[in-house]
Image (cartoon, helix red, strand yellow):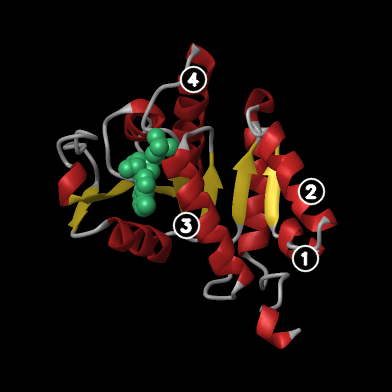
Amino acid sequence: MRSVCVFCGSNPGDRPAFVELARTLGTLLARRGTTLVYGGGRVGLMGAAADAALAAGGRVIGVIPQMLLDREVGHSGLTQLHVVGTMAERKRLMGELADAFITLPGGIGTMDELFEAWTWTQLRLHDKPCGLLNFAGYYDALIAFLDGAVEAGFLRPRHRAALIVDTNLESLLARLADAAGRPAPVASPAAE
Ligand code: AMP
């Protein structure tokens, strides 16, 4: 797993533990020699993860749309910063540059990114593993919703299982690295 795309809040959240978590992920990725790919901003958890990875000597690639350069304060100290035209291009390029995806706490932008990457797995548009860190129960309600979607027949159990959920960062990284080395466990709906 040479690179991981990190989706997380452009806000810092309501407690220091969120920022600490993002910093820990940045440091862990740098120590593993894994490139951090992210949305390219200086703000919130995004900036905290990037700063920590850089401080630990890691490689960080940002992808930011021109329209967000000011609002999310494009990070000027990254290994590489790609400025793209649209939000859709941002997600596409982040997806191309990464071997796996990890989602930390965040808002609706983070949810948009997680669900797009995960649906690409479901549709076999890529075979890159997606991980969700359920830090301090932040995603309990989302996980309950997803399990409800399986029960209601809208989400196949194996597609649900393709989202790797963990409460521990190091364990989630290890599971993603393991899954990144294997073919995707899901089949496309058309092939079923
Ligand atoms: P948030 O979780 O709302 O703080 O947003 C986290 C990141 O997702 C920010 O960099 C947002 O600009 C980004 N984002 C929000 N919506 C989209 C979208 N439709 N496509 C790509 N990135 C998005």
Q: Which mark is residue 172?
A: none
Mark 2 falls on what kind of element?
Answer: helix
Q: Which residue is mark 1?
A: 156
Residue 178 sits in which quadrant? bottom right
Local packing at callout 2 (Cα closer than 10 Å; few below 14, some 14-19, many 20+) is few
Q: For marks 4 and 1, give the one nearer the viewer.
A: 1
Horizontally, residue 59 falls left or right of residue 26, namely left
Local packing at callout 3 (Cα closer than 10 Å; few below 14, some 14-19, many 20+) is some
Q: For marks 2 and 3, give the one nearer the viewer.
A: 2
Of the two numbered discs 1 and 3 on the same chain, state the one appearing first in sequence.
3
Q: Are marks 3 and 4 in contact (CB under 8 Å)?
A: no
Horizontally, residue 111 falls left or right of residue 169, namely left
Which of the two residues, 74 or 139, is positioned nearer the viewer here? Answer: 139
Disc 2/disc 1 C-alpha distance (Å): 11 Å
Q: Which residue is mark 2?
A: 148
Return the x and y of residue 72 as percentages of the image width and height.
24, 35
Q: Quadrant of the C terminus?
A: bottom right
Q: For marks 3 and 4, give the one nearer the viewer.
A: 4
Q: Is mark 2 within 8 Å of ligand 1?
A: no
Identify residue type, mark 1: Arg
Q: Is mark 4 within 8 Å of ligand 1?
A: no
Of the two numbered discs 3 and 4 on the same chain, state the one appearing first in sequence.
3
Disc 1/disc 3 C-alpha distance (Å): 30 Å
Identify residue type, mark 3: Arg
Q: Which residue is mark 3?
A: 2
Q: Which residue is mark 4?
A: 20
Q: Residue at x 36, y 32 (%)?
A: 10
Return the x and y of residue 29 as percentages of the image width and height.
48, 41
Return the x and y of residue 148 as percentages of the image width and height.
79, 48
Horizontally, residue 105 falls left or right of residue 89, namely right
Which of the two residues, 120 or 19, is positioned nearer the viewer here? Answer: 120
Which residue lies most toward the bottom here?
191
